């Protein structure tokens, strides 16, 4: 076994461990708003709790027709081969972020992905805590 394959295997194990906190069950915003304690389950089997004030903030900024379509959390993917961006694969999340004025309407999905600068993604995480996550790809 060469050093590179051992390093890749180790890195794969670490990525899986990091991603255990990522929500595996994404829930429509409308359903989360109806829950007494809005939550879902992580890939690691733990409860993932949403902040109600964050959900209400998003709902107030979105057209009603997106409340049932937008599944939370919005998950951006970090690819170690792309140093300054993350990508999003959910077209409804892109539509919602555009409707909220968080992303330009000029951004379009290409090949099932849209790349967003990491600084913007981190700002979204700060603005919408618990509703945006980053998974390592």
Image (cartoon, rainbow, N blue to C red):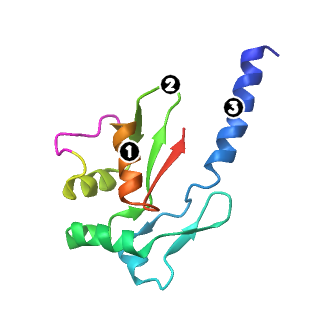
Nearer the camera: disc 3 or disc 1: 1
Is 104 placed left or right of 1 in the picture?
Answer: left
Callout 1: SS: helix
The answer to which quarter of the image holds residue 9 is top right
What residue did someone put label 3 on? 11
Q: Position of residue 57 (x, y in %)?
A: 30, 70
Query: Which residue corresponds to the image point at 26% horizontal and 67% vertical from the top-left?
Result: 66
Question: Crowding at label 2, few (<14), some or many (≥20) Cα neighbours within 10 Å?
Answer: few
The quarter of the displayed image where residue 99 is located: bottom left
Q: CA distance from mark 3 to mark 1?
A: 23 Å
Q: Quadrant of the N terminus?
A: top right
Counting residues from the start of the chain, the first of labels 3 and 1 encountered is 3
Residue 4 shows in this picture: yes
**Is label 2 in a helix, a strand or a loop?**
loop
Q: Is residue 80 left or right of residue 59?
A: right
User: Is the residue marked by circle 1 packed among few (<14), some (14-19), or many (20+) residues within 10 Å?
Assistant: many
The residue where tag 1 is placed is: 121
Q: Position of residue 118 (x, y in %)?
A: 40, 37
Q: Residue furthest right?
A: 1
Per the model, the C-alpha gap separating discs 1 and 2 is 17 Å
Is residue 113 visible to the viewer in this orientation of the structure?
A: no
Q: Earlier in the sequence, mark 2 or mark 3?
A: 3
* Quadrant where the image shows the C terminus: top right
Q: Return the disc, 1 or 2, that comes first in the chain's sequence.
A: 2
Task: State the image quarter where residue 54 is shown.
Answer: bottom left
Q: Residue furthest left?
A: 106
Q: Position of residue 14 (x, y in %)?
A: 70, 39
Q: Which residues are magenta?
A: 104-111
Residue 112 covered by magenta stretch: no
Apparent side of residue 120 relative to residue 6 in the rendered image (left or right): left
Q: Which residue is mark 2?
A: 81
32 vs 21: above or below? below
């Amino acid at each position: 076994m060469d050093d590179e394959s051992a390093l890749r295997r180790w890195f794969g194990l670490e990525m899986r461990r990091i991603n255990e906190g990522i929500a595996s069950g994404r829930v429509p915003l409308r359903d989360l708003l109806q829950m007494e304690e809005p939550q879902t389950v992580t890939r690691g089997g733990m409860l993932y709790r949403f902040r109600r004030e964050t959900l209400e903030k998003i709902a107030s900024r979105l057209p009603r027709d997106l409340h049932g379509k937008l599944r939370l959390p919005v998950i951006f993917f970090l690819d170690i081969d792309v140093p300054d961006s993350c990508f999003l694969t959910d077209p409804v999340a892109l539509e919602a972020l555009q409707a909220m004025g968080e992303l330009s309407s000029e951004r379009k999905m290409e090949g099932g992905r849209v790349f967003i600068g990491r600084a913007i993604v981190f700002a979204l995480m700060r603005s919408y805590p618990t509703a945006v996550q980053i998974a390592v790809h």
